[in-house]
Amino acid sequence: MIGILAEKPSQARNFAKALGGMTGTYNGESYVIVSARGHLYEFSDPSKQVPASLAKIYSSWTLDALPWDESIFAWKREKKKDTAGTLKTIRDTFSKCSEVVIGTDDDPTGEGELIAWEILSELALRPAKVSRMYFTDESEKEVRKAFTNRKHIPSMTADMDYVKALYRTQWDFMSMQFTRIATLSVGANNVILRQGRLKSAIVKLVGDQLELIKAYKPVPFYTNKFKDENGHIYVSADEPSYDSKDKVPIIYKTSAVTIDSKSTAKTAPPKLIDLASLSAKLSSKGIKADTVLKTYQKMYEAQVVSYPRTEDKFITPEQFNDLLPHVDKIARLVGVDTNLLSHRSPRATHVKTGCAHGANRPGPKVPSSLDSLDGLYGAGAKDIYIILAKNYLSMLAEDYVYERQLGYLEKYPAFKGSANIPMSQGWRAVQHDAEDDDMSSDTNGLGTIANPFISEDVPPKPQVPSVRWLMKQLEKYDVGTGATRTSTYADVTSAKVKCPLLSEKRGKIDMTEYGQMSYGILPGTHIGDLKMTEKVMSDMRLISEGKATPSDLLKEIRQFVKDDMSVMQANALKVRKEFGIMSKDFEKKEKYQGVWKGDTVSFTRTWGGHRFTDEECAALCRGEEIEVHGLKSAKGTTYGITGKLAQLSYNGNSYVGFERTGFASKTGVPDSWCGHDFTDEEKETLENGGTVMLDGCLSKKGNIFSCEVSYGTREDGSKGIIPNFG
């Protein structure tokens, strides 16, 4: 029996559709399909990665505990919350299989391999054979071909996609040290400054641009120029400029224009779009990056668009030919004249061999209407499809053709002008985004007579940071893939996370107060250097090529941490002064005084953002354990804890304070139902009487279904999940 591991339920459904069911026989081989739900494991806390004698040091949020020694890390993983049911299904199924097929997403960073091998390793599954399905999309044709042509993987350590992905994950895990350094150095109450690779790169780029804008002074300067009757300007590179209009000498007279040359020029269609550029275009419409990610993923699962997390800039000849029969239907759907699509052979600028998933583009399933897309897949679906479709279709249009005119003044040959006169719009009639096109077009060519005038100019103001601008900068510095840029940007701008670094309004980016603190602590650091992310990406390539080992590369982080610790502490002095943050040693905190174990004590009245009520303080002084609810995690989820007063210590000093003893009792909502693992948000919704729509549930007979559920009293009088199939 062959066991196929899908990354998520929707993918499992597509596999089943292609092969003939969740279980069955294809091409003479018996198979069974099971699904993960993304990453089912995560690295345990640093304190659990080291020998017990060092656990206290590695759990401490003090600078004395840094840098960590990664060479002693066990790299232990633990199950993510609410994954027990999914893992049991995978273990029970694969324990009966002689071959396991990795069918997770074929991500350029190796994330799909990491998800799969984590599961196989932690569940101690040892099938006789492990193989890999490689597919460009989840269409029936691609899935069948991938299953038939699956590649044997000798072992986990021989899978270099897994090894490079593991290195990146370990690097990012070790980068928690930079967050601790920044947070501790600034010492702002209840503020966490997340200094990851991409986050720091984004903050640095935006912060530098905002500083340029702040320092900008629009000092005008004046110079002699000419203008002809068609509005074209003639300038001389040798002409001096002056700080006052009165100082400009009046020495020129009207002159005839001589056209020096006329030539026909062409420009090819713009390159195929990536997810970051797509998100940037949509930002001006008020559609946030996290919305784009969620909506695009749903559209991909329905095969309406191509694979999202691609690193490819081109498509293959086969991918070009697969979509060619659908282009007229796509064109009519988005309002493009099919007569414009006359270039129906592959362009060398857009179509090349050697791609995997291919660049982002429409999928093989063409929607019946645009108006239904938002309702089917989420906000922004219609706009996503229109932009993707027109970008792809422009490749099938002819080149933009124009006449290029160059001229000079008869009396003053040093003054030159130019004009671009459209001859054939070509692809511009399909897709023309003026913001992305820096070539101007003129209705009329150069004139015949030009008159002198004194031109008043100012240095161009630095561009206000926008999502488009940022994504172009990140691409310029090779910072992550288009999908990674989009997801990281979504994270640093999300109002759901604690201490978001940036804010966005209709595509324009600004810094939050937390972002300003983060930016202030970055100058001179390794983590704030754009080359750091370039280095990690380069290291991953070296690892995948067998030219470097993760252990040798991870060693370098220790020195980075040492260097950044001293730099951040120096930068923090300025940040604290700017924001009026007192040193933690002298920071005033609200205290409660009472009698505990017969002694008068004073303890801090807040914990994790919660302020203890008088009743809670009194209960704590009586030695009782209390429950605190409504706390927010770093990811924005709500949780509760239990705790009591205890004798604690910090930096060798003993004090009385609140100590967490565990998590508060769970709600009556179960962890999972019919193969679906409930998230904290879903549990909270159900407990409060709401409903949740579930996708990819598994019946006792092995059938996949979707339904809306609530939590309450069932017909038999018991409490539980109540499905609604209506």
Image (tube, helix red, strand yellow):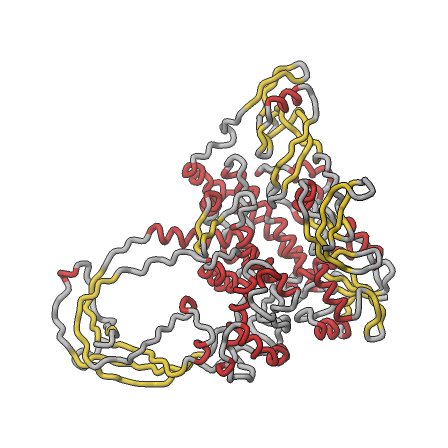
**Location of residue 113 in the rendering, given as x and y in whole percent from the top left corner:** 70, 61
Q: Is residue 100 visible?
A: no
**Location of residue 579 in the rendering, given as x and y in whole percent from the top left corner:** 43, 38
Which residue is at the front of the view, 458 or 698? 698
**Location of residue 631 in the rendering, given as x and y in whole percent from the top left corner:** 62, 37
In the image, 436: left or right of 49?
Answer: left
Q: Residue at x 67, y 34 (%)?
A: 641
The number of discs equals 0
Quarter placement of the N terminus: bottom right
Q: Is residue 378 visible?
A: yes
In the image, 707: left or right of 445?
Answer: right
Q: Is residue 608 depicted above or below 521 in this figure?
A: above
In the image, 286: left or right of 167?
Answer: left
Quarter placement of the C terminus: bottom right
Which residue is at the front of the view, 173 or 443? 443
Q: Residue at x 78, y 65 (%)?
A: 101
Which residue is at the front of the view, 667 or 566? 667
Residue 618 in which image quadrant: top right
In the picture as drawn, the residue positioned furthest to the top comes out as 598
Q: Is residue 603 depicted above or below 694 in this figure?
A: above
**Location of residue 2 in the rendering, given as x and y in whole percent from the top left corner:** 83, 66
In the image, 114: left or right of 442?
Answer: right
